[in-house]
Amino acid sequence: MSDHELRKEAHDVDVTVWVGKSGVDAVVDELADQLDDRKLVKVKFLRAARGGTSTEALADELAEAVGADLIETRGNTAVLH
């Protein structure tokens, strides 16, 4: 599927992973499990996780940690495939 098709499909997906003050490392295993079960996972980065870092940088770090593709970031939410 193209990124455009995946973005359209992600529109109806609910957030199932929240990254908080514990950071990206705390959700790597959970995200990997969810990506095994479904095609797309939405991740919300809470204010405590962001600190002075951008959502895009955190999403890239998380995608790299689980070996996933980052489809898009919008606001404080990222979609991974």
Image (tube, helix red, strand yellow):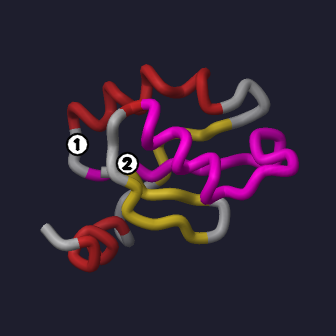
Residue topped by disc 1: 38
Q: Residues within 10 Å of mark 2 (few under 14, many from 20)?
A: many
Residue 25: % across, % down: 59, 24
The image quadrant where one finds the N terminus is bottom left
| Element assignment for label 2 | strand
Residue in the foreground of this view, choosing between 38 and 64: 64
The location of residue 39, given as percent across then percent down, is 22, 49
* Residue that lies at the very extreme toward the left in this rendered image: 1
Identity of the residue drawn at 43% across and 20% down: 29
Q: Which quarter of the picture shows residue 5?
A: bottom left
Residue type at mark 1 is Arg
The residue lying at 40 percent from left, 56 percent from top is: 70
What is the span of residues highlighted in magenta in the rendered image?
Answer: 40-65
Residue at which label 2 appears? 41
Residue 51 at x, y = what percent?
85, 45
Q: Is residue 7 above or below residue 66?
A: below
* CA distance for labels 2 and 1: 7 Å
Image marks 2 and 1: residues in contact by CB distance under 8 Å = yes
Q: State the residue in front, 38 or 81.
A: 81
In-image side of 81 versus 28 (left or right): left
Mark 2: which amino acid? Val
User: Quick one: label 1, few (<14), some, or many (20+) residues within 10 Å?
Assistant: few
